[in-house]
């Protein structure tokens, strides 16, 4: 790894990310008053100040904080380069909410460095991205290596589904141009031993299921046995879409044909990771994974649908729960959809399945959010496949690995449709135990440095591929 990147991360980037973790700039979905609270502006100003200083070393570069009316801000950086090609590098700086369960001495807004890992919300998801992109470009400048024109887009709405981003991409479309390469630094890695390329992303269909049986709560001794439980009805409705014994989704519309190359990559990833596919997760007690075959677990996570209940309303805390039959149950449902499944259509199917013919004539509503479709990467061009292999070997000492991810990056699906001929490098630092969105999120600093160095090499190979 270039000593330049080592020094830049140690001396300048880590201290800046430490300051960034202290800022509670939650995404708009989790802070409706984000504009008046000012945390997002503070994070943008921190990033802007650091980047402007570094861009002085890259002649002709510009940075603009673009602000469309009533939308989260976006940092747009242009760095001139050789030739007529453009590379688009993407990241985001908004954060997930706090979440309970942080280890004593750590917290979401309390940066702590332990054993080379920077703990705190947002460092790995996805505050590091702009710094990795610029450190790669600065490293090429230091080495006297060429790169194409690069534009860096850092949005502030990704954790809310990137609903502001399409407006910015349209607004900036002429300035962006048509990139021949997109680098996304907001994904995961199967381990910290090699470069991982994300080959696919699942989509999501989600919304709030509400079952109402009363206009107000009634003493359970008086109502139970006469009034059906809203929870029991909700539980039964979920069985329309999921087998509670196996977790298997029952709706055919949620299944797709898995491409042969993705099946082979799942087998390869299973051979690399083995039991780490599931041992990386904080299972409680004697809980076991949903399958014994590691390849099947990878496919479950990346190419098959799965339901999670991520929130509930209508219930008091147990300490305050009296003997009352409650009037309603609301469950937040999150259905992960396969990469090539139409999430909008899937959302409609879920809504129909849940609302049709409700038991006891109860009031049932599924308030669905707009579905977000997933993404399946195009085939790698030979030059890019070779470049990734060289970069991983050079900086990690091991071959590049390939695996789909179970989450969503809305920007990738949007760009895939907009630029069908573009090559994609989707990678990241979210490896075992890094726990994005949950407690104890951390950024593995060594991995971030190596990913930065790999991106520098790919940018250099991209610029030289026609020579």
Image (cartoon, grey):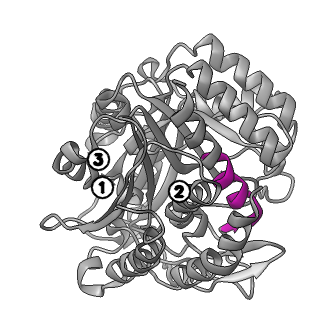
Q: Is residue 294 left or right of residue 148?
A: right
The structure residue drawn at horizontal position 73% and vertical position 32%, both measured from the top left corner, is 389
Residue 327 against residue 163 in the figure, above or below:
below
Task: Decide: few, some or many residues near mark 2? Use Cα within 10 Å; few <14, some 14-19, many ≥20.
Answer: many
- In what element is the residue under mark 2? helix
Q: Quadrant of residue 19?
A: bottom right
Q: Classify the position of the N terminus by image quarter.
A: bottom right
Residue ranking furthest to the left: 69
Q: Classify the position of the C terminus by image quarter.
A: top right
Label 1 or label 2, whichever comes before in sequence order:
2
Q: How many marks?
A: 3
Depth check, mark 1 against mark 3: the one in front is 3
- What is the spatial separation of the Cα atoms under label 2 and label 3, in whole angstroms? 33 Å
Label 2 or label 3, whichever comes before in sequence order:
2
From the image, tell me which residue sits under label 3: 369
Label 1 or label 3, whichever comes before in sequence order:
1
The structure residue drawn at horizontal position 59% and vertical position 48%, both measured from the top left corner, is 145
From the image, tell me which residue sits under label 2: 133
Q: What segment carries the magenta color?
A: 442-455
Answer yes or no: is residue 327 visible. Answer: no
Asked if marks 1 and 2 touch (Cβ < 8 Å), the reply is no
In magenta stretch: residue 452: yes
From the image, tell me which residue sits under label 1: 213
Depth check, mark 1 against mark 2: the one in front is 2
The structure residue drawn at horizontal position 75% and vertical position 34%, both measured from the top left corner, is 390
- In what element is the residue under mark 3? loop
Q: Is residue 70 left or right of residue 271?
A: left
**Image spot of residue 51 (x, y percent):** 44, 72
Relative to the observer, which residue lies in front, 232 or 167?
167
Q: Quadrant of residue 64?
A: bottom left
Residue 438 against residue 170 in the figure, above or below:
below
In magenta stretch: residue 100: no
């Amino acid at each position: 790894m270039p000593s330049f990147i080592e020094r830049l991360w140690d001396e300048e980037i880590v201290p800046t990310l430490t300051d960034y973790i202290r800022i509670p700039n939650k995404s708009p979905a989790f802070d409706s008053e984000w504009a008046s609270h000012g945390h997002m502006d503070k994070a943008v100003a921190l990033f802007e100040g650091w980047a402007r200083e570094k861009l002085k070393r890259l002649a002709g570069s510009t940075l603009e904080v673009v602000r469309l009316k009533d939308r989260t801000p976006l940092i747009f950086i242009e760095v001139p380069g050789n030739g007529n090609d453009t590379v688009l590098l993407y990241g985001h700086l908004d954060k997930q909410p706090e979440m309970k369960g942080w280890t004593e001495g750590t917290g979401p807004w309390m940066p702590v460095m332990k054993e080379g890992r920077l703990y705190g919300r947002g460092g790995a998801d996805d505050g590091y991205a702009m710094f990795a992109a610029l450190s790669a470009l600065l490293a090429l400048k230091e080495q006297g290596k060429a790169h194409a024109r690069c534009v860096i887009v850092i949005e502030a709405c990704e954790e809310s589904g990137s609903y502001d981003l399409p407006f910015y991409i349209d607004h900036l479309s002429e300035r962006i141009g048509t990139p021949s390469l997109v680098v996304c630094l907001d994904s995961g890695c199967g381990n910290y031993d090699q470069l991982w390329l994300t080959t696919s992303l699942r989509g999501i269909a989600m919304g709030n299921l509400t079952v109402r049986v009363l206009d107000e709560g009634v003493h359970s001794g008086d109502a139970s046995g006469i009034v059906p439980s809203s929870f029991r009805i909700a539980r039964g409705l979920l069985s329309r879409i999921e087998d509670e014994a196996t977790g298997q989704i029952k709706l055919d519309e949620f299944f797709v044909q898995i491409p042969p190359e993705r099946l082979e990559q799942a087998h390869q990833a299973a051979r690399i990771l083995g039991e780490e596919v599931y041992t990386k997760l904080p299972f409680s007690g004697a809980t076991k994974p949903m399958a014994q075959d590691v390849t099947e677990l990878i496919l479950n996570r990346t190419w098959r649908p799965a339901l999670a209940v991520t929130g509930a309303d209508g219930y008091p805390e147990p300490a305050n729960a009296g003997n009352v039959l409650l009037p309603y149950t609301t469950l937040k449902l999150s259905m992960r959809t396969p990469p090539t499944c139409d999430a909008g259509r899937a959302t409609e199917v879920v809504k129909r399945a849940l609302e049709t013919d409700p038991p006891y004539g109860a009031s049932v509503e599924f308030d669905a959010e707009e579905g977000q479709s997933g993404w399946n990467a195009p085939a790698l061009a030979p030059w890019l496949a070779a470049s990734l292999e060289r970069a991983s070997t050079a900086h990690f000492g091991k071959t590049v690995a390939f695996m789909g991810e179970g989450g969503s990056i809305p920007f990738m699906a949007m760009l895939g449709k907009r630029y069908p001929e573009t090559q994609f490098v989707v990678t990241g630092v979210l490896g075992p135990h890094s726990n994005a969105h949950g407690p104890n999120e951390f950024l593995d600093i060594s991995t971030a440095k190596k990913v930065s160095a790999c991106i520098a090499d790919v940018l250099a190979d991209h610029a030289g591929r026609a020579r």
